[in-house]
């Protein structure tokens, strides 16, 4: 068993180290990344007249776990300003970060932002306010906005059902593309009349590293792990022995992050469309891909109303059980 652990740990340590090193090298170069995103031949004269415009952006912290709010804010500011100059605008960008959706909802009408980046669960809470329209979604891969989530237990575990996890420990992957698994788990417990996560499990540990979620479970140091199917499949490709882990439950496809816009406050309708188009094209260049990797997004794609229906179902289950 120790030999297996060494093989797994060595492989993943190399991968994680590479990703961390790449990300650290990427952060100080954000302005360079965005400048590289401009088409070849784009240049601006110091005397060239740019139309002044102001854009307000709101970020919900839940949408970017594991990322510094200052890094995320700087990325949005740089992106909007450079794209604005590309299209002939002198853009002033104000980025505000909110701990939760309640803070954003409480804003007076004249303080509402033009662009909001938030998780799908938070969007359901603000949707009824009717001033935001979802237009974009983040994806884990090429136009893949949905992800499945799995609950896994150690190989040879006697745990066969969700009920068997009562009082046990669970690791949960909590990243920008994986946090929606938490409300799914809550709805699953409610469906089985098992109460809340806090009352049902003995200990809950949130991790932003897939390896830290799964390996302790594989080696029976923890009782269960909740992870996106895509992340687990990637790990299992490198270490097939992980496929010995039984799956207790798997979710329906769920969407994670949404970018919504307000119809009000835009000084120019064109700058609104220019920003939307630019975000849709980020994945087409190496520099744009680096930017997406910073947020652990595969791609930004057009939002479709049907994308959020499975999240609505989970919300209905939780709300109905609370009444």
Image: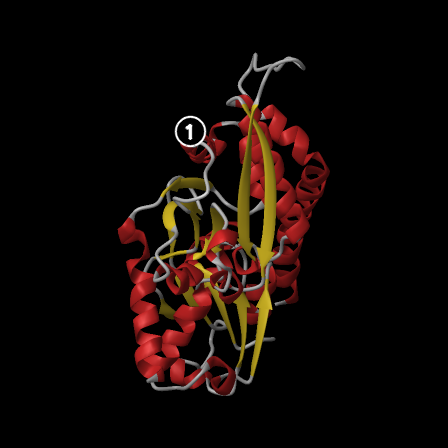
Query: In this orientation, which residue lies closer to the viewer: 168 or 160?
Result: 168
Question: Quadrant where the N terminus lies?
Answer: bottom right
Identify the residue under disc 1.
270
Q: Position of residue 312 (x, y in %)?
A: 31, 64
Position of 223 with respect to 16 (left or right) is: left
Visible in this render: residue 151?
Answer: yes
Identity of the residue drawn at 62% across and 26% down:
35
Residue 247 seen by the camera? no
Residue 300 quadrant: top left
57 lies above or below 130? above
x and y, in percent, of residue 298 in the image:
48, 42
The single residue placed furthest to the front in the displayed view is: 110
Q: Position of residue 155 (x, y in %)?
A: 48, 71
The answer to which image quadrant residue 21 occupies is top right
Q: Residue, x 41% and y 86% (percent of image)? A: 195
From what the image shows, is residue 301 above or below residue 193?
above
Which residue is located at x 55 percent, y 53 percent? 59
The percent position of residue 314, horizontal first and vertical second, equals 33, 69
Badge 1 element:
helix
User: Would residue 88 appear left or right of 313 to someone viewing this image?
Assistant: right
> What scheme was used to colour the molecule?
secondary structure
At a point 57% along the width and 15% down the height, the residue shown is 42
Residue placed most toward the observer, 271 or 42: 271
Q: How many numbered circles are shown? A: 1
Q: Is residue 274 left or right of residue 207?
A: left
Q: Could you say which is closer to the camera, residue 187 or residue 229? A: 187
Question: Could you tell me which quadrant the C terminus lies in?
Answer: bottom left
Q: Residues within 10 Å of mark 1 (few under 14, many from 20)?
A: few
């Amino acid at each position: 068993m120790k030999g297996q652990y060494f093989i797994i740990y060595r492989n993943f340590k190399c991968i994680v180290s590479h990703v961390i090193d790449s990300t650290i090298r990427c952060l100080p170069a954000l302005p360079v990344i965005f400048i590289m995103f401009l088409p070849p031949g784009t240049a601006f004269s110091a005397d060239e007249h740019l139309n002044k415009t102001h854009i307000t952006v709101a970020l919900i912290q839940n949408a970017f776990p594991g990322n510094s709010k200052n890094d995320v804010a700087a990325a949005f500011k740089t992106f909007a300003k450079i794209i604005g100059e590309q299209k002939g605008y002198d853009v002033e960008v104000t980025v505000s970060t909110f701990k939760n959706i309640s803070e954003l909802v409480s804003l007076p009408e004249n303080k509402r932002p033009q662009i909001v980046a938030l998780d799908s669960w938070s969007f359901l809470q603000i949707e009824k306010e009717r001033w935001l329209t979802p237009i974009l979604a983040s994806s884990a891969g090429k136009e893949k906005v949905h992800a499945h989530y799995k609950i896994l237990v150690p190989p040879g575990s006697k745990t066969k059902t969700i009920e068997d996890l009562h009082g046990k420990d669970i690791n949960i992957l909590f990243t920008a593309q994986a946090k929606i698994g938490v409300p799914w788990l809550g709805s699953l417990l409610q469906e089985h009349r098992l109460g809340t996560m806090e009352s049902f499990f003995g200990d809950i540990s949130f991790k932003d590293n897939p390896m830290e979620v799964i390996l302790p479970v594989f080696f029976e140091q923890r009782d269960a792990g909740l992870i996106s199917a895509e992340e687990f499949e990637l790990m299992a490709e490198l270490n097939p022995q992980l496929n010995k882990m039984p799956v207790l439950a798997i979710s329906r496809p769920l969407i994670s992050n949404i970018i919504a816009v307000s119809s009000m406050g835009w000084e120019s309708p064109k700058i609104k469309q220019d920003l939307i188009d630019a975000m849709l094209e980020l994945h087409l260049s190496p520099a744009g891909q680096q930017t997406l990797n910073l947020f652990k997004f595969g791609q930004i794609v057009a939002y479709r109303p049907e994308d959020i229906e499975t999240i609505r179902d989970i919300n209905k289950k939780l709300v109905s059980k609370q009444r």
